[in-house]
Image (cartoon, rainbow, N blue to C red):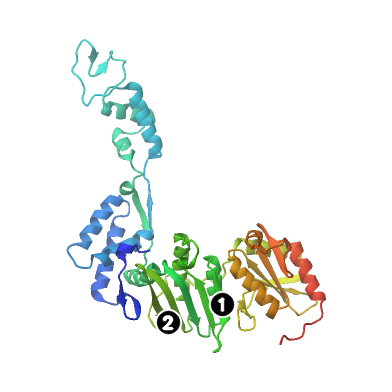
Amino acid sequence: MLTGDLVRIRWTRDGLKCGFIDAGNARLLEKATAVLTAFEEHIGASRGALDEALHEVEGDGVDHKLTRGLAKLCLDRAEFDTTAPMPPADLRRAVFSLAARIGPLRTAEVPVDAGGVGGMAGGADAPPTTAASVWQALAAELGLSAKALSAALYADLPAEQTLIAVDIPTPVWLLHRYNVALVQAALVHARSVTVTLGTPGPGEIRALLRAVKFHQLLAEIRPSSDGGYTLHIDGPASLFSQTTRYGLALARFFPAILLLTSPWNMRAQVAWRQRTTPIEINHETGLVSHYKAQGTWRSREAVWFHERWTETVPAWRIEEGGLPLDQGGEGMVVPDFTLTHADDDRPVHIEILGYWRKGSLKRRLELTARHGPDRLILAVSRKLMQADPDDNGEPPEGVVLFSETVPVKEVLRMAEAMRAKPRAKPRA
């Protein structure tokens, strides 16, 4: 991502405005091509040599911030490696240990005299007394040349590491990535994010909500009067203790919104340079996501539960949860799985709640008690439940507690009990 000194964002009367660039501009394409070419031509070279080449690309132009920003995004997708015959730290330890044993060292060989021959203080069998001699002795011991050994001594320093690869498909891709990175830089400091969704299809809404869970964001989704949804996400600046890790997670989530093909609008309140100001982006802004559409992610707890349920409960079919379930217009339940018995067409839904705040959990329990759905099981982390000062040790009805894995037997017991109940009357 872009660091603060590389961000091109300005204040306006309406809020923050990003300095978006035109990915089709010939001059900018030439600049992006030059940056990418510098990386490609220095594969196999040191990072220090790459930095010099990038400095030449930057030249005397006036758009240093843009050039450095493009280079930073390339560095984020570059792979460097330490090229050395052995770990440099081990090599340094061996060199300094040998030098300490045979020292003191001289800066040059001493003349031949009665006390030694060619710098060997104490005779032909005495240890070497210069740095060059140390290199030669250790190189002979390791079966390497003294030159290779010297080059590898500090090969793990950033400037000495070797560029192995850079994953930037095209210059146009890099320019689009730059525009998205500008928004991400602002979202790292967000107090709140509200995404208004038009009418996304089932696959799109599921993929977006999976992205929310994947990045462990504190979010709530509600239905809107026009048939769409409103997704509210807490920002890092809204937490009791703002964390850079959460801010980065929110920023990394943003490209998932860009995958939507239906209309959407995002408005965020951002703590920017000691002021709180809005930033607004929508589907007409023209941003292009660098993510691939992937709607199959599941949390570790969900994966384990699916595997164990499939193996041990053949009478119940387990499927991926469907669309969000309405809770009286005040909230939405996004089930992770839907369980259906072979002899019953009424499904039981299960939602796994791990990374939530106690306030969000309390609201979920209250909405479920008032609006259902009736055949819903909430699997809640014990750590999350214990964070509630009102917890009396007994989980509420319909709640299964778990530590590492969701207990299949307890979920099955609850599902069977729900199946045994008569059909519930529609809630008022």
User: Residue 335, located in which quarter of the rendered image?
Assistant: bottom right
The N terminus is located in which quarter?
Answer: bottom left
Mark 1 / mark 2, whichever is N-terminal: 1
Residue wearing tag 2: 283
Q: Residues within 10 Å of mark 2 (few under 14, many from 20)?
A: some
Residue wearing tag 1: 221
Q: How many marks?
A: 2
Q: Is residue 104 visible?
A: yes
Q: Position of residue 30 (x, y in %)?
A: 24, 70
Gap between marks 1 and 2 measured at Cα: 19 Å
Q: Residues within 10 Å of mark 1 (few under 14, many from 20)?
A: many
Q: Is residue 85 visible?
A: no
The kind of residue on which mark 1 rests is Ile
The C terminus is located in which quarter?
Answer: bottom right
Give the residue furthest to the bottom: 226
**Which element type, helix, strand or loop, lies under badge 1?**
strand
* Image: 38 above or below 159: below
Q: Residue at x 30, y 63 (%)?
A: 5
Q: Position of residue 314 (x, y in %)?
A: 76, 67
Q: Nearer the viewer, residue 17 or 129?
A: 17
Q: Residue at x 74, y 70 (%)?
A: 397
* Image: 426 above or below 296: below
Q: Nearer the viewer, residue 340 or 250?
A: 250
Q: Nearer the viewer, residue 171 or 334?
A: 334
